[in-house]
Image: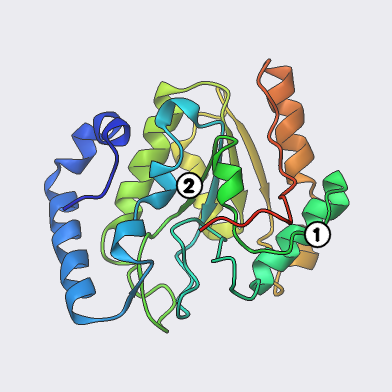
Amino acid sequence: MIILDDEWKKFLSDEIHKEYFIELMKKVSLEYESRTVFPSYKNIFRAFNLVNPSEVKVIIIGQDPYHGMNQANGLAFSVCDRCKIPPSLRNIYKELVDDLGCKYPKSGNLTQWTAEGVLLINAVLTVEKGQANSHKEFGWQKFTDAVIKKLSDEKTNLVFILWGAPSQKKESFIDTKKHFVVKSAHPSPLSAYRGFFGSKPFSKTNEYLIAQKKKPINWCLDAEQTLL
């Protein structure tokens, strides 16, 4: 069963009825039955279900879910409230503080951004416990490529934030004449100092949205508010 809300089912109706996607969901279901897979099955499409297609303003694309126990919550780069903040997200927060002057968030949970119209999707939506990128050949890439192309084709003036080479491969599915692409090195400790720090993705995004007469994103996370 696809746990995808009705608006996204309608928006992606052509894609989710294709043979490859049906086979993908069968394979994923079998993985959940026989192995420990993250995020929880109900949260595979959580990033989509928290932001309706009509509400999307910004798309941030990660690689695949965190593969540690109880980390992944269905949103790219995000973890549960009680989880230790992962290294890449710590660097995202450092840039957030430097770029916009926000207070450093206490939680690694990015759910608040979804209420602002931020779609936080990974290129691959599932992963086996302890095995990074273990589901990269399942067919998820084909699906998320199609999602990005569909959003690009049918919407205008979106912002696509692409951190690192794998995410930047998605740019080929984006009409850069209609949309704004923000790209830099990945926030990973291995690459953050090679162009992520100082790239100002949050202020650049808001400047573009304001220029397009759209409400800017409130990127500053409420340190007191906790969301599941």
Quarter of the view holding residue 215: top right
Residue at image location 76% in from the left, 36% down from the top: 204
| Real-space Cα separation, disc 1 to disc 2, in angstroms | 30 Å
In the picture of the structure, the residue carrying the numbered disc 2 is 170
Query: Is the residue marked by circle 1 packed among few (<14), some (14-19), or many (20+) residues within 10 Å?
Result: some
Instruction: Return the x and y of residue 16 as percentages of the image width and height.
Output: 20, 42
Residue at image location 34% in from the left, 66% down from the top: 40
**Regarding mark 2 in the picture, which secondary structure is present there?**
helix
The amino acid marked with disc number 2 is Lys
Of the residues under marks 1 and 2, which one precedes in the sequence?
1
Instruction: Count the marks.
Output: 2
Instruction: Reply above or below: 4 against 179.
Output: below
Query: Is the residue marked by circle 2 packed among few (<14), some (14-19), or many (20+) residues within 10 Å?
Result: some
Say if mark 1 contacts mark 2, CB within 8 Å: no
In the picture of the structure, the residue carrying the numbered disc 1 is 104
Q: Residue 123 shows which numbered tag? A: none
**Regarding mark 1 in the picture, which secondary structure is present there?**
loop
Q: Nearer the viewer, residue 90 or 49?
A: 49
Residue at image location 14% in from the left, 52% down from the top: 22
Relative to residue 60, is residue 23 drawn left or right? left
Instruction: Reply above or below: 223 against 39.
Output: above
Instruction: Return the x and y of residue 50 as percentages of the image width and height.
Output: 44, 42
Q: Nearer the viewer, residue 62 or 164?
A: 62
Relative to residue 139, is residue 216 drawn left or right? right
Relative to residue 128, is residue 197 drawn left or right? right
Q: Nearer the viewer, residue 197 or 37?
A: 37
Instruction: Return the x and y of residue 25 as percentages of the image width and height.
Output: 19, 58
Instruction: Return the x and y of residue 183 as percentages of the image width and height.
Output: 66, 47
The amino acid marked with disc number 1 is Tyr
Residue at image location 68% in from the left, 73% down from the top: 87
